Amino acid sequence: MSDIHALETNIWFTDVVLGEYDVRGVLLLGEQRAIVWDTLSHPRDMPGYQPLIGDRELVIVYSHADWDHVWGTAGLPYQNAAILGHRSCRTRFAEDVPATLEEKRSAEPGVWDDVRLVAPKQVFDNSESLDLGSMTLMLHHLPGHTQDSIVGFVPERGLLLMGDAAETPFPVVPEGSPLPRWIAELQHWEHDPRVRTVIPAHGAIGGREILQRNIAYLQGLLDEQPIDVSEPLTAFYRDTHRANLRARGLAD
Ligand SMILES: [Zn+2]
């Protein structure tokens, strides 16, 4: 079970502790609809939302198809829900998403039995907008961490939901990642004066400085001059930094 916290009026978030890191999802409540931004790692991560959702129409949005963001869907009444993601997010549900679940199930028998893989029913290529009455959630493709990564912006609140497109302290960079585009898209948001609160799925919530730090980190990789990450890091982020350097062909 996860803890649910109020961020501001009608916006809630939940942080789930996984083995090596935490993952965060967000609940946005409109007059008629509720939007769940990521269903997290396991169906048990979700039921706490239900009393808040009440009888609102449920919309689920996947920031991307990595397991820790989409495996909790069966913990919600998803059968009648709208489920949105990027077009390539849906593709992944026929490819790496089931493969990862098979791996986890054989590594940890019993633990993942309740997980149901539920692909997006509605997909988009560049952007999509969801009306919540007094708020709007605007979805934008932001590939880099994965091809299917998106971000969500609530202009009325200055709130930017990053998924894994930005993290604290820095993102996970796969081999072949389109760094120039990733950086340019983050710069676009960093220069948008409407952005006040930045919510990554991993690491502290903050402001536009999170975008600045991620841009600087990615630019360092692109320039083959990695920035110094000598600050105290968890084992996960020490490993991630080394893997990021390897993915760019840079010596540690
Ligand atoms: Zn993640």
Image (cartoon, rainbow, N blue to C red):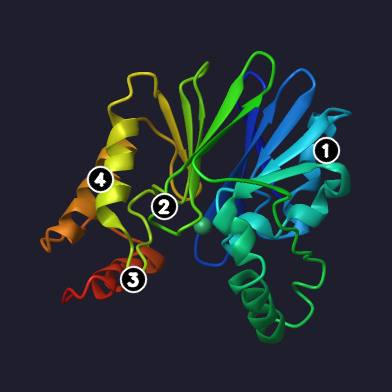
Q: Position of residue 241 (x, y in %)?
A: 29, 66
Residue situated in front as seen by the camera: 249 or 207: 249
Q: Nearer the viewer, mark 3 or mark 1?
A: 3
Residue identified by numbered label 4: 215
Task: Tell me if residue 5 comes above or below residue 131 in the rendering.
Answer: below
- The disc placed on residue 92 is none
Specify which label sits upstream in the sequence, 4 or 2: 2
Instruction: Please say if the residues under marks 4 and 1 sit with CB atoms less than 8 Å apart.
Output: no
Residue identified by numbered label 2: 143
Residue at figure coordinates x 62%, y 75% from the top left: 100
What is the residue that sits farthest to the bottom in this orientation? 106
Q: Is residue 241 visible?
A: yes
Q: Position of residue 63 (x, y in %)?
A: 56, 48
Residue identified by numbered label 3: 175
Specify which label sits upstream in the sequence, 2 or 3: 2
With 10 as the anchor, is 203 left or right in this view?
left
CA neighbours of label 3 inside 10 A, class few (<14), some (14 to 19), many (20+): some
Q: Amino acid at mark 1?
A: Gln
- Marks 3 and 4, how far apart at CA: 17 Å
Instruction: Please say if the residues under marks 1 and 2 sit with CB atoms less than 8 Å apart.
Output: no
CA neighbours of label 4 inside 10 A, class few (<14), some (14 to 19), many (20+): many
Residue situated in front as seen by the camera: 178 or 157: 178
Residue identified by numbered label 1: 50
- Marks 4 and 2, how far apart at CA: 14 Å
Q: Nearer the viewer, mark 1 or mark 2?
A: 2
With 47 as the anchor, is 251 left or right in this view?
left
Residue at figure coordinates x 26%, y 75% from the top left: 246
- Marks 4 and 1, how far apart at CA: 36 Å
Specify which label sits upstream in the sequence, 4 or 1: 1
Specify which label sits upstream in the sequence, 3 or 1: 1
With 99 as the anchor, is 56 left or right in this view?
right
Q: Nearer the viewer, mark 4 or mark 2?
A: 2
